[in-house]
Amino acid sequence: MNLGAQSAAAASNPWDPRPVLIVTGLIQEARIAAGPGLTVVCSSSDPKQLRVLLSDMDFRAVRGVVSFGVAGGLDPKLRSGDIVVASEVRAGDRRWSTALAFSEELLADAGLGGRRVVRGGLVGSEQVVGARHAKAALHAKTGAAAVDMESHIAAHYAHEAGLPFAALRVVSDPATRELPSVVSTAIKPNGNIDVRKVLRGVARNPASIKALVSTGLDFNRALRSLRGCRGVMLDVGGLVSVNL
C-alpha cells in the first residue's frame, strides 16, 4: 500500500524537491503520516510484503527514509505512548546507524507538548513479539528500547540506496504487557483489523477480553502520541537534506 505519494514539484524543500519515504506497518500509522512532500508505504505488518514494495520503488525518487509508527516495548521503564527516537536499528548480526543530526532534530521537536521521548535502539523482527518472556529475552540480548517489524527493512533499504535514515516509534504494548495472540493474526492484507477474527478469538477464549481491552487502550494511547509527532514529518525535508 502506498499513501500520500507526491510529485517532485509538490515537495517543499527548495534544495531537494524529492519526497521523503515514510515506512509504516499499519494503515492507521500510514494515515497519520500521509501528507505533502511525503511518500508513505504501509506493509500491513508483513515483512515480505514490505520488501516487495520497496524493491519496486526507485530510490532515486526520494531523499531520505523514515520508519514511523508504533512498536512493542522492550525496556521495562517505557510505557505506552512513550516515544523512541532510534539511535540504531539491529536485526540479527546486522546494525544500521541513524542519521545523527536528523535524529537529534526529531528528538528535540518530538519532545514539544510534554511527551516522554527517549533515544535508544530498535530491534527488527520478522514476527510479532508479544509474550512478556520473549520481550525480556530480546531486551537482555540486545539492550534495545523497542521492537517492530519494519525498521530493520527500512534501514537496510536506506543503507543500500545511500539515503539518510531515521526512525521514530511510539511504544504501544509495553514490556510488562502480554500481547494477545489474536492481535497478531487479525491484521488484514490492507492493514485493517479483522474484527470478525478478533471476535472469534474472544469466543474461543473469553478470558482474553481483559487483555484485549488493555491492548486497545495502549494502542489508542500510542496513536494519540504518534499524531502528536506528525508535525515532525512536516519538517522532515529540511532535516534530511542536511545529511545529503
Image (tube, rainbow, N blue to C red):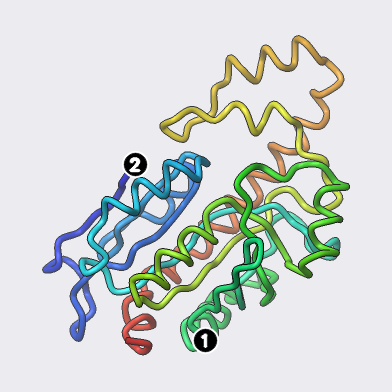
How dense is the environment of label 2, judged by Cα within 10 Å: few (below 14), some, or many (20 and up)? some
Q: Position of residue 154 (x, y in %)?
A: 46, 61
Residue shown at the point (43%, 68%) measured from the top left: 231
Q: Position of residue 137 (x, y in %)?
A: 85, 56
Q: Position of residue 144 (x, y in %)?
A: 73, 67
Residue at the extreme left: 9
Residue shown at the point (66%, 31%) measured from the top left: 183
On screen, 206 above or below 152? above
Q: In the visual, does 205 lie left or right of 97?
A: right
Q: In the visual, does 37 lie left or right of 81?
A: left
55 or 179: nearer the viewer: 55
Dot 1 corresponds to which residue? 100
Label 1 SS: helix
Residue type for callout 1: Leu
Residue type for callout 2: Met
Q: Which numbered dot is residue 139?
A: none
Label 2 SS: loop
On screen, 71 above or below 143? above
Residue shown at the point (31%, 48%) measured from the top left: 3
Q: Position of residue 211 (x, y in %)?
A: 81, 32
Q: Quadrant of the C terminus?
A: bottom left
How dense is the environment of label 1, judged by Cα within 10 Å: few (below 14), some, or many (20 and up)? some
Q: Earlier in the sequence, mark 2 or mark 1?
A: 2
Q: In the visual, does 237 lie left or right of 24?
A: left
Residue shown at the point (59%, 53%) measured from the top left: 70
Q: Which numbered dot is residue 1?
A: 2
Q: Quadrant of the N terminus?
A: top left
Instruction: Report which quarter residue 196 is drawn in.
Output: top right
What is the number of callouts on the image?
A: 2
On screen, 27 above or below 180? below
- Label 2 to label 1, Cα distance in Å? 29 Å
The reply to whether discs 2 and 1 touch (Cβ–Cβ < 8 Å) is no
